[in-house]
Amino acid sequence: AGGDGTVRVVCSELVGSNIPVALIPAGTGNLLARNLGVPLDEQQAFDVAFEGKPSPIDAVKFTIGNQTEHFVLMSGMGGDAQVMANTNTDLKKVVGSAAYFLAAAQSVGTAPYHLTITLDDAEPIKRSAVLALVGNVGTLQAGIRIFPEASPTDGMLDVLIGNPTTVSDWAKVATGLLGGADVEPLEYAQ
């Protein structure tokens, strides 16, 4: 019972154990529950926990330096990481998901950084980006499909690289994400 941070910690510890995890969405975003179709009503989620059938999902292992972690949702760099770092925990308790949108508005203007991405066995791709995301699921709060093709059970990761640099670019990104359209400042890969 908790939010996505609790889910990440619990799932990371249980990777490879074959111990089933029941989700009782008691956080702000509850992204894993939303993406798996677990009811957001806690009593209904308990019913699913006790009466549902366990099914495995993918977990993503990543290493930074000597530290290895796992996630089952998404992980990001740049603007995305800045949004997560800038989201006020106390404000989340008062306004819920709107706290993320406020942090996102504060992150507009994040300086681009250089990154190199290698997908499968292809040649490395060099980009300048404001944000980069790797996802195991596709839907955010408010039904925003950031990764339209993502599935937590297909053994594949979805990648998003974005370099919106102007207010117009950010507006295109927001419109594209809300409408599920492919927009120019964003590149997708799987």
Image: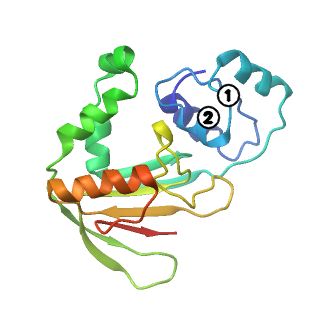
Q: Are marks 1 and 2 in contact (CB under 8 Å)?
A: yes
The disc, 1 or 2, on the residue closer to the chain's N-terminal end is 2
Residue 4 spot, x, y in % from top left: 51, 32
Tell me the quarter of the picture where residue 169 sits.
Answer: bottom left
Quadrant of the rendering where the N terminus is positioned: top right
The residue type indicated by label 2 comes to Ala
Q: Disc 1 to disc 2, how far (Cα)?
A: 7 Å
Q: What residue does disc 2 label? A: 33
Where disc 1 sits, the SS reads loop
- Is residue 185 toward the left or the right of residue 118 in the image? left
Residue at screen point 55% across, 20% down: 26
In the rendering, at what x and y percent does residue 12 appear? Answer: 57, 40
**Label 2 neighbour load within 10 Å: few <14, some 14-19, many 20+:** many
Q: Is residue 103 above or below residue 179?
A: above
Q: How many marks?
A: 2
Q: Residue at x 31, y 16 (%)?
A: 90
Can you name the residue that lies furthest to the bottom here?
123
Q: Is residue 105 left or right of residue 183?
A: left
Residue 64 appears anywhere in the view: no
Q: Secondary structure at mark 2?
A: helix
Q: Position of residue 179 (x, y in %)?
A: 43, 53
Q: Who's the residue at 25% across and 53% down the image? A: 171
Determine whether 124 is above or below 84 in the image. Answer: below
Query: Which residue position is annotated with label 1?
Result: 39
Q: Residues within 10 Å of mark 1 (few under 14, many from 20)?
A: some
User: What is the number of the mark on residue 98?
Assistant: none
Residue located 41% across and 49% down the image: 178
The colour style of the image is rainbow
Residue type beneath disc 1: Pro
Q: Is residue 88 left or right of residue 6?
A: left
